[in-house]
């Protein structure tokens, strides 16, 4: 039985995590920096370019994109536009699209919808991706301080890998949810729990 190739994408406005998985073989992993230009569509174009390049290079059967939170911030709005743009480009190419919210990904991969990003990374390493162990950041000495940006860097890739694993076991295609549907399906945002998420 041929395993599908899955491109997992953790979209962002500064960094985008990517992972390409075929069965249990990690074919590619990385984080791509997006340079903020003078206009929001500069970063949207960069994200589109990164994803289209990955699709051309790795020829995935499935593209899985993490569904962003809907928050009342400019960055959140730009992230949602990036996600919408990626959904449309994937559909335009004719690939299977899977969109999953973060809590569903964590539930499928870790068994806990409230797992931290570091806990997700640790589970992935323990499940056979040992080559990634050195990329897991150390938890902060004081949880209230959270992780520094350089410590969060590889967590975008771990999120993309978790997404690829979750999508591989999903069995159902999730079309791009409408804004109304995204608002209902997105998990609640808890400011006190964002330190290492």
Image: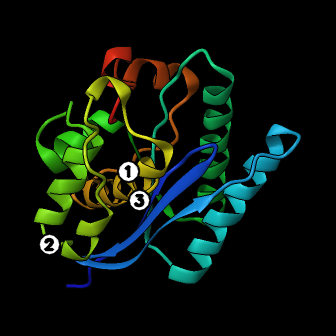
**Horizontal placement of 108 versus 104: left or right?**
left
Quadrant location of the C terminus in the rendered image = top left
- Mark in the foreground, 1 or 2: 2
Q: Which residue has dot 1 on it?
A: 173
Q: Secondary structure at mark 3?
A: helix
Measured as percent of width and height from the top left, residue 42 is found at 82, 48
Measured as percent of width and height from the top left, residue 34 is found at 68, 54
Task: Pick out the residue farthest to the right.
Answer: 38
Measured as percent of width and height from the top left, residue 25 is found at 26, 80
Question: What crowding class fits label 3: few (fewer than 14 Cα within 10 Å), some (14-19), or many (20 or more)?
Answer: many
Name the residue: 51% across, 79% down.
Answer: 59
**Horizontal placement of 117 versus 19: left or right?**
left
| Residue 98 visible in the snapshot | no
Q: Is residue 148 above or below residue 48?
A: above
Quarter-wise, where is residue 3 in the image?
bottom left
Label 1 vs label 3: CA separation?
A: 22 Å
Q: Which residue has dot 3 on it?
A: 157
Label 1 vs label 2: CA separation?
A: 26 Å
Label 1 vs 3, first from the N-terminus:
3
Question: What crowding class fits label 1: few (fewer than 14 Cα within 10 Å), some (14-19), or many (20 or more)?
Answer: some
**Horizontal placement of 86 versus 29: left or right?**
right
Q: Are marks 1 and 2 in contact (CB under 8 Å)?
A: no
Label 3 vs 2, first from the N-terminus:
2
Question: What crowding class fits label 2: few (fewer than 14 Cα within 10 Å), some (14-19), or many (20 or more)?
Answer: few
Q: Secondary structure at mark 1?
A: loop
Q: Which residue has dot 2 on it?
A: 128
Q: Are marks 3 and 2 in contact (CB under 8 Å)?
A: no
Name the residue: 68% across, 37% down.
Answer: 81
Foreground residue among 156 and 94: 156
Task: Pick out the residue farthest to the front.
Answer: 141
Q: Are marks 1 and 3 in contact (CB under 8 Å)?
A: no
Label 3 vs label 2: CA separation?
A: 16 Å
């Amino acid at each position: 039985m041929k395993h599908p190739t899955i491109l997992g994408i953790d979209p962002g406005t500064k960094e985008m995590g990517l992972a390409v998985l075929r069965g249990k073989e990690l074919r590619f992993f990385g984080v791509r920096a997006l340079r903020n230009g003078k206009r929001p569509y500069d970063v949207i174009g960069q994200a589109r370019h990164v994803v289209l390049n990955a699709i051309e290079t790795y020829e995935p059967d499935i593209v899985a994109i993490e569904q962003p939170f809907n928050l009342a911030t400019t960055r959140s709005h730009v992230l949602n536009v990036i996600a919408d743009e990626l959904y449309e480009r994937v559909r335009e190419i004719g690939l299977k699209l899977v969109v999953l919210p973060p809590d569903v990904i964590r539930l499928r991969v870790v068994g806990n919808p409230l797992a931290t990003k570091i806990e997700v990374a640790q589970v992935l390493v323990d499940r056979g991706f040992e080559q990634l162990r050195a990329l897991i950041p150390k938890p902060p000495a004081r949880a209230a301080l959270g992780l520094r940006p350089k410590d969060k860097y590889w967590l975008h890739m771990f999120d993309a890998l978790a997404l690829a694993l979750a999508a591989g076991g999903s069995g159902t295609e999730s079309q791009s949810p409408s804004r109304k549907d995204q608002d209902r399906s997105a998990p609640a945002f808890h400011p006190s729990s964002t330190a290492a998420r």
